[in-house]
Amino acid sequence: MADAALSDPALLPVLTRIAEALERIAPVPPARPSLAGADAFVWHPHPIPRLAPVPRVAAVDIVLLKGVERQKAILLENTLRFARGLPANNAMLWGARGMGKSSLVKAAHAAANAEAPGSLALIEIHREDIRTLPELLNVLRAQDRRCLVFCDDLSFEREDADYKALKSVLDGGIEGRPANVLFYATSNRRHLMPRDMIENERSTAINPGEAVEEKVSLSDRFGLWIGFHNCDQDTFFAMIEGYAAAFGLPIGQEDLHREAVEWSVTRGGRSGRVAWQFVQDLAGRLGVKMPA
């Protein structure tokens, strides 16, 4: 019957109009995510995979990050090496909260692009989307630009199997990690998992040693482990003095230190984040505008 219909010249215009109508109502294939037009992007895997450009990254100038000189030197060298097309390592920044881990990643990215504008794209992937990391890497594999994939506050809880997907990605799997992609993560936990989760594996597994190794081996996939620790008072003072000088705050050192100590006591500790929050409050009281 179909052959007969096709052989009838009168039916051909009808079939042509039907085919054209179907083409018009068919959904347009999604455009392949692009790295054009910005230096930073956020990965959104659903409902349609896309890289949302970030017009302006909330980054602190790397020279203002005080008290983490060794960590800064290590990460900056690794990032610049990668941006220049040389071998570099995935990096895990772990340790005390508020000590500038994520700020350092963004500052190192900015420093690399200051040296060679547009050389390095920063791609943020949210913790809840980490299982889509292989899909993101497939997108980035086809790009000419070098990409720094960044996951802030990465950790895994009990019964969370996403760490297995991340292990495979960091090892490269059968395809290998794309040569134009590097992965940075920050975490308050050295092994990305709570201690009770590791201890539970040790107590319930048939072979405790193997079970623990399975859990903690994820962090071994990072070539660089960079630790951050709570700062002492001298380091805290160096942080606020650096900010105060950079932003021209009209206050003497003695008053600056006295107010900073009072602020840190009310916050229950000292850290880079506490120092930044204090300087913002102080600038507001002094009527000095701060960068957004």
Image (cartoon, rainbow, N blue to C red):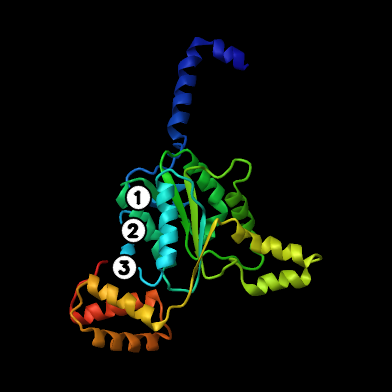
- What kind of element bears circle 3? helix
Task: State the quadrant of the N terminus.
Answer: top right
40 or 62: nearer the eye? 62
Q: Is residue 151 above or below residue 199?
A: above
- Residue under numbered circle 2: 57
Q: Which mark is residue 281?
A: none
Looking at the picture, which amino acid does disc 1 mark? Asp
* Mark positioned earlier in the residue sequence (3 or 1): 1
Q: Are marks 3 and 2 in contact (CB under 8 Å)?
A: no
Q: Position of residue 90 (x, y in %)?
A: 52, 54
Q: Residue at x 72, y 72 (%)?
A: 200
Q: Position of residue 208 (x, y in %)?
A: 77, 67
Q: Are marks 1 and 2 in contact (CB under 8 Å)?
A: yes
Looking at the picture, which amino acid does disc 2 mark? Val
- Residue under numbered circle 3: 64
Q: Which mark is residue 39?
A: 1
